[in-house]
Amino acid sequence: MASINEERFLCLLQATRYNYTDEEKFVLIEVIAMIKGLQVLMARMETVFADAIRRNIYAELQDFIQLSLREPLRKAIKNKKDLVRRLVHHVYYLTYLVTYFTLLFLLT
């Protein structure tokens, strides 16, 4: 008795043998080869991609801290809104912690 994988292989074999021309088969093989080549290339570049992603996260966090949180924190302190000030300050602090650990991870 044939296994499920063997049955699937035979169905695929028959489908490609009888439903595609030789030119279509060649193009299909070329596309599969390109996809496999791209997979190998991306696997080699994984560290570069990971580093770029980490640097982007770091830059976005810095922009968030220095541009988006600064003004609400300043206004909350100025208007003596203690709850808002504490909330924004905690978000500010947590974001700095994330930035710090992201930077540590970048350097290792």
Image (spheres, grey):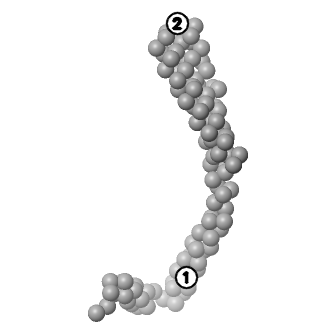
C-alpha span from label 2 to label 1: 69 Å
Residue 38 seen in render = no
Q: Position of residue 84 (x, y in %)?
A: 48, 15
Tell me what residue is drawn at x 53 percent, y 6 percent.
Answer: 79
Q: Horizontally, is 18 left or right of 48 in the view?
A: left
* SS state under label 1: helix
Residue 18 seen in render = yes
* SS state under label 2: loop
Tell me what residue is drawn at x 39 percent, y 86 percent.
Answer: 9
- When the figure is inspected, residue 65 is found, relative to residue 33, above or below; the finding is above
Quadrant in the picture for residue 59: top right
Quadrant where the N terminus is found in the figure: bottom left
Q: Horizontally, is 6 left or right of 81 in the view?
A: left
Q: Position of residue 5 (x, y in %)?
A: 37, 83
Comparing 28 with 70, the one in front is: 70
Which label was assigned to residue 80?
Answer: 2
Dot 1: few (<14), some (14–19), or many (≥20) neighbours within 10 Å? few
In the displayed orientation, state which residue is furthest to the left.
Answer: 1
Quadrant in the picture for residue 92: top right
Tell me what residue is drawn at x 67 percent, y 40 percent.
Answer: 103
Q: Position of residue 46 (x, y in %)?
A: 63, 60
In the displayed orientation, state which residue is furthest to the bottom.
Answer: 1
Which label was assigned to residue 29?
Answer: 1
Q: Horizontally, is 107 left or right of 6 in the view?
A: right
The kind of residue on which mark 2 rests is Lys
- When the figure is inspected, residue 96 is found, relative to residue 39, above or below; the finding is above
Quadrant in the picture for residue 41: bottom right
